[in-house]
Amino acid sequence: MDWFWLVPALPLAGFLVLFVTEGKLPDKVVAFVGAGSVGLAALVALGVGWQFVASGQSSFSLPLWTWIAVGDFTPSITLYLDSLSLVMTGVITGVGFLIHLYATGYMWQDHEEPKGYSRFFAYMNLFVFAMLMLVLGDNLLTLFLGWEGVGLCSYLLIGFYHRDPANGYAARKAFVVTRVGDTLMALGLFLLFWEFKTLEMQAILAEAGSLTPGMATAVGLLLLGGAVGKSAQVPLQTWLPDAMAGPTPVSALIHAATMVTAGVYLIARMQDVYLLSADAQHVVAVVGLVTLLISSFTALTQTDIKRILAYSTMSQIGYMFMALGVGAWSAAIFHLMTHAFFKALLFLASGSVILALHHEQDIFKMGGLWKKLPIPFWSMAIGSAALVALPFTSGFASKDAILLTAYDNGGWLYWGGGALAAGMTALYTTRMMIVTFFGRSKTEPHDDSKANMWLPLVVLGILSIGGGWFGIAVLDDLLGPIKSFSHFTPLALVTIAVPLLGVLVGWLVFSGRVNVSAVVESGLGNGLRRYWHGGWGFDWVYDRVFVKPFVAMARINKNDVVDLVFRITAALARGLHYIGALTQTGRLRWYAANLGLGLVLVLLIVLEVL
Amino acid sequence: MAIEVPVFHVLMLAGVLFLLGLAGVLVRRNIMFLLMSLEIMMNAAGLAFIAAGAVWGQPDGQIMFMFILALAAAEVAVALGIVLQISRRFDTLDIDAASDFNG
Amino acid sequence: MILAVVLLLLAAGVLAWASERFVGANAPRVVSVLAFAVGLAWAISEWLGGPAATGLYAAQHIEWIPRFGISVALSMDGLSLLMVALTMFLGIIAVVSSWDEIETGHGFFQFNILWVMAGVVGVFTAMDLFLFFFFWEVMLIPMYFLIAIWGHENKGYASMKFFLFTQISGLLMLLAILALVFVHFRSSGEITFSYEKLLGADVDPAIAMWLMLGFFAAFATKLPSVPVHTWLPDAHTQAPTAGSVILAGILLKTGAYGLIRIAVPLFPQASMDFSFWAMLLGVVSILYGGFMAFSQSDFKRLVAYSSIAHMGFILIGVYAFNEVGLQGAIVTMVAHGFSTAALFMMAGALQHRLHTREMSRMGGLWVHAPRMGVMTLFFVVASVGMPGLGNFVGEFLALLGAFGKNVPLAVAATVGIVVAAVYGLYLMQRSFQGTPNPDVAAMPDFGARDMSVMILMAGALVWVGVYPQPVLELAGATIATLGVLP
Amino acid sequence: MTAAGISALLPLLVLSGGIVVLLMVVAWLRSGAVAFVGALVVLGATIVVTPLALGTGTQDIDGLLEIDGYALFFHGLFAFAAVATAVLSYRYLKPRAAHAQEFYILLLVATLGAAVTAATDHFAGFLLGIEVLSISLYAMIAYPQEGRGPLEAAAKYLVLSGAGTSTMLFGMALIYLVTGTLEFAPAGELSRNEQLLLAVGQAMLLIGVFFKLSLVPFHMWTPDVYQGAPAPVTGFVATVSKAAVFAVLMRYALAVGVVDAEVLRNVIVVVAVLSMVAGNLLALLQVNIKRLLAYSSIAHMGYLLIAVVVAATPQVRSFGVETALVYLAGYVLMTLAAFGVVTVLSDADEDAEDLTAYDGLFWRRPVLAAVLAAAALSLAGIPLTVGFIAKFYLVAAGVDGAAWILVWALIVGSAIGIYYYLRIVFAMTKRPEAGTQAPPVAWEGVISVVVLGASIVVLGVFPAPVIDFVRALGGP
């Protein structure tokens, strides 16, 4: 296990190689370095995980060096492995490798960017490194290092095609909005440090009992702020749909499988703090619930395939948050893992479709593709089934666990909201599948995908189905019991039935068998659709409350109002100079008169008149 | 016959003379008159010295007066040289003409 | 030895000036680099040699003006050593980075650079308040010349503003120094400007507050802090690249150094009483500086305002009155020296190539110059406060310290990191990303020399970011002896 | 008179004897060069004998003169300034005066007058010294044969100075009336009316002094005279005549306790503050360098009054005197240097008084520019120059003497001042226009300004010898 440090080091090395060579390497070598470093990391992680599980230890620390040592504040760079971080590491390196592999094909001869191939993999490798630091750090500062690092890579990759200002805008929006969350999180770190004089997570968790409820709530909410930003939950969710501007593998890796779930990881990791504060936990659950509802409704109205998937990601993470909020820690992580599988699959498959259609992303310009693009279609179908949580898929296993625990721990509201959203999920997924793959063909695809592109799809497809079994088999041991569908109560049956119902309704509506245009085209229907389409108006409000005033004030104050004070002082001095200069007339008699006036002045002072 | 003149009166006279001289400097434009006015101011001071010397019964006041006279003469000598040159280079004795410098 | 180094720089300045006439236009630059290299080597050797039993790496004491108890007292402890090393390093960087920028007066240019640095080294090592003030002012005049002679279109205004601000605040400091000396004289009967002796001066609290404010005014102006910051954007915008590098990298740090070394230790209680206001100024600097940075359209002005924001972290760190905060301030000093200096070099390189600093006339430059793009990105990211790079360590520690002192202010200051992201990425977007500006047909990328300088700076930032321990240890030894922490 | 008295008088004797001899020599050899060399010899001899005189201790000469270290300091300083003025004038006068021999004699006489003024503690000596100085200056100012400027300056100076002197004389008479002595001595017990009369007399005396020191509001003649006078003479007026009058003011103030009287102290403070602020403001945007230096000298004389006020406080009296002497030494150096550069750069037709004449000087004449920059920075009080030491002394004295109003005025004034001194420096750093050839300049002038400039810097860095020297002199 001493080789453990290689797991983050390998992607970092890959990044450094690609960075130093400045894109001068041949593309094949780049692909080898870029994907190979992550693949190797995955292998090492597998080996280390095997050893770890075999050793029966509950945790393992690998101290590397002391980062900062100032008085009590002595965070070190220490890799910490326990079941939670092991699962995360597996997802990051495993799914990450598959996506890298896929990207070697997807980005191949992407001529839009000179030397873009190398740059892309450099960023991707850096991302994997940062994400690993996030989950492997034993203290919150290292976690924060990874946290910010993945944010940076997300920024870089969203804006990968930097010539289009819209991409740049999306990238900056992602970075800045998540930074808002990061700020709250940083405050949480400060608070924790001054409470515990350490940021080491295990030490904090061990001592957490000493927190007052108020303090626990404060810490919980501040950390939640960070999580909400990173995981695109209400109210900081607005960046994620725009983040789809990045290349599709990026969306799969960062904005579906790994980075956006960092918030879930954080809260799961700090669960002992949340256990101390029912209020904070409650807020977590509500955030999840609201997000999953809002985003699943919004997904229904989107036409861009990647935006649909983005909203679906938000809603799935909403499930995870809800799970965390109701204390279903293992279920949340389980769903995190299965979601990584099937959402990566969905994105990659949609990427294949997009590539085949020459970067067309509007589902209404697709159609009838199921025969022409069989591998993407079947991948998409499997992924959708898992997303919808049809029985015997991985998504079913995890979502079912969440909903049932939500009912047990949280009550009707959480279960009902989750179930409603599950229905909506089924509805919009069906819509996406039908519109994209069936019906009349609108654009002619050309499929030239190679093994490096379809292989990941196949593997992820298998995982999307089988991952559930794996989860039940392994994670139960590792993370603690995951509630599962072992008991067939009526509620469980309803939970199973809702997605099926959603699929059925979707099929009826979107294949045209039931005409709902009257409802959709009505005033209310139209309005709702527009409202949902715009993401429930969050962007609109933020734009008017924060962005526009800030920009307007900046424009007005470009010349720095503070400087005015000094400019006025200077102008005053100049004015006095001119006035003074006027007295210097050059007339001798005026000068003499002044002498007389001065004489009078002095005599007045002397005689104490003045 | 000694006539006692109160020192205060002499001082008043000196003061008046001084102010007269000053007023002359202020109102006259011809340099010659300016110089005369200056002489009046100086002599006012000299008169004050004599009065003061008389009060204390010392010769110092009168000696000062003689110094003043001597210096005034020297000053006027230089001044007249300057006046001569002014009348040549400015073609006038109006002091207001010599106001090239200002600001 | 310290005096010898100061004199070495001064002499090298004269030599550089003379060498232009007698050897050639290249000679001054070589002389300059050599002098700084010797200085850096000296600093490093002192570092490696370890401190003496007194905790000092070097010390010197020569009578100067006995009438007032003034002496040339120079000593170098950890903090001084750190700052001197940084000075020498950035000296080399400044010279190399502006190798081709200056077209006339190479000799006098290098003369000024060397003399500024000599003054700076003096400031960082002076142990006599008169000497401190002396060096404090000595570094201004050459800096003034650098801006006034080799500056850009509005150099007269900018250099004058720079000089006036620092001079006037310096006069207040002089007044405070003298008042302190005479207060000490009244109580002890000894007239002295010795820092150590004045540390023990018994000053009435009400008077101490005023004296402290006199020092604070000078240091806050130099730092600079809002509301006396307005000289900085002008000075930076107009200064030649080397001038900006020195100004941002070193000169601003003398203000921070003054706070840490002089203002706070001399008047601990008054500083403590004042800490809320100082931190408030810091917070305002962070937020307002960031806000103003965003509103700029001039590359250099933007970076200049960002400097103001960074300096705000130093203020809150110093006045947090705990070790974490102080260390944060010191690390910020070092890290900001690298990151902002590099950004100014980038601005200079762009201006050299495009003859403009207006970002509206840039855009999409990555296409022409990916190396410049990458390096700009790196330093923007650093100044945005990315963990793993030096600025983060400094700012995080400063905020952490501030949080322990005053929670609301710390919260407000933390908002600054969002603002930093806004203006930092905006800078990147407008210059290197986006649609390539059709007016820019082509632009030469960085060559090996520029690139090696940049990588050196980047390496330094990474070093401070992932292993700041050497910096922390050097500074920590000093902090322990300052005796200002409760 | 004792032997010690005679040796104390040596500088004055050498100077006046030299004048007589030179007058006769020049009567035979009507040559400017001879007069020039003669003047240098006389002044040199004066400087040489001054240290000899120092050894004798304080000598009271017939009640009229008080030769002490304080006086001898000024004797040396004036002779030094006169040497510089003579050297600078030599080439300057050639195109301006066909017969320059009288000029050097006038210079010697003026120096003698200044020396007497600085050494007297008696109204008669005061009057004689100051008038000998002034009358010589009128002639020196009007010396050039061509142009209206010198005449205008001389006429204004003569008339206004005459008015000022008359005021001063009237004041002396009043003082004499009350105290019954012409010596500088504190008055005895006085009635209320007598006190008032004395105060009026002292005020009028002060007005005369203020006029000579060109303090606001008696300053108006200064820029016009400075502008019109030949550049080297301006330098002499700005230094020697100012220092002499200041010397006697200090002596009188300390001997009589003028500043002890509340009202007179107020007068001095008001005048000082007005001078510091108004002088600097008037100079702010001035584009004529001679006028600019004139306004700057107004401000500097305002600063100097701090020393008078401080010296009047008993426990810091010697510090105040020390401050004044150090300041004046520095002031003389930097002012001479500044006017020296103006002189050297002046061509046959006109003085180099327009600031645009200095554009790009750094590139055309780096040495002269460096000297002028040193002088300007020194006047601004920037370290590395003697001006900083001088300003440091003033602030220290102000703080020690708790003259807070004056210290703050000093700071405000200095702040304004930096701007216009720096404008001079900035003008010199401008890029020269292509092809502008620098005309040849007088080498002896360059040498003298370089000496001045170097001493500005050297004394700015190593002031200790001067300080020790001044402290050893003792006060008036």
Image (tube, rainbow, N blue to C red):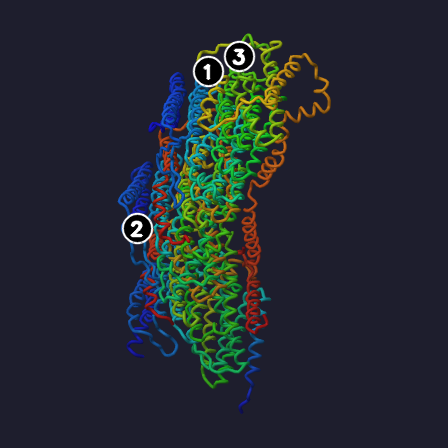
Examine the image and state in which quarter residue A13 appears.
top left
The residue beneath circle 3 is A378
Q: CA distance from mark 2 to mark 1?
A: 63 Å
Secondary structure beneath disc 3? helix
Q: Is residue D218 above or below residue A170?
A: below
Q: Residue at x 66, y 14 (%)?
A: A508
For the question of whether residue D97 can be seen, the reply is no
Q: Is residue C186 left or right of residue A307?
A: left
| Three-letter amino acid code of the residue under disc 2 | Gly
- Chain of the residue displaying label 3: A
Do pointers 3 and 1 mark residues of a single chain?
A: yes
For the question of whether residue C403 can be seen, the reply is yes
User: Which is nearer the N-term, disc 3 or disc 1?
Assistant: 3
Q: Which mark is residue C55?
A: 2
Examine the image and state in which quarter residue C39 appears.
top left
| Three-letter amino acid code of the residue under disc 1 | Val
Q: Badge 3 local density, few (<14 within 10 Å), some, or many (20+)? A: some
Q: Position of residue A192 (x, y in %)?
A: 47, 42
Q: CA distance from mark 3 to mark 1?
A: 12 Å
2 and 1 marks in contact (CB < 8 Å)? no
Secondary structure beneath disc 2? loop
- Chain of the residue displaying label 2: C
- Chain of the residue displaying label 1: A
Q: Position of residue D360 (x, y in %)?
A: 42, 44
Q: Which mark is residue A459?
A: 1
| Three-letter amino acid code of the residue under disc 3 | Trp
Q: Badge 2 local density, few (<14 within 10 Å), some, or many (20+)? A: some
Front-most of C376 and D67? C376
Q: Residue at x 49, y 72 (%)?
A: D205
Secondary structure beneath disc 1? helix
Q: Position of residue D469 (x, y in %)?
A: 32, 65
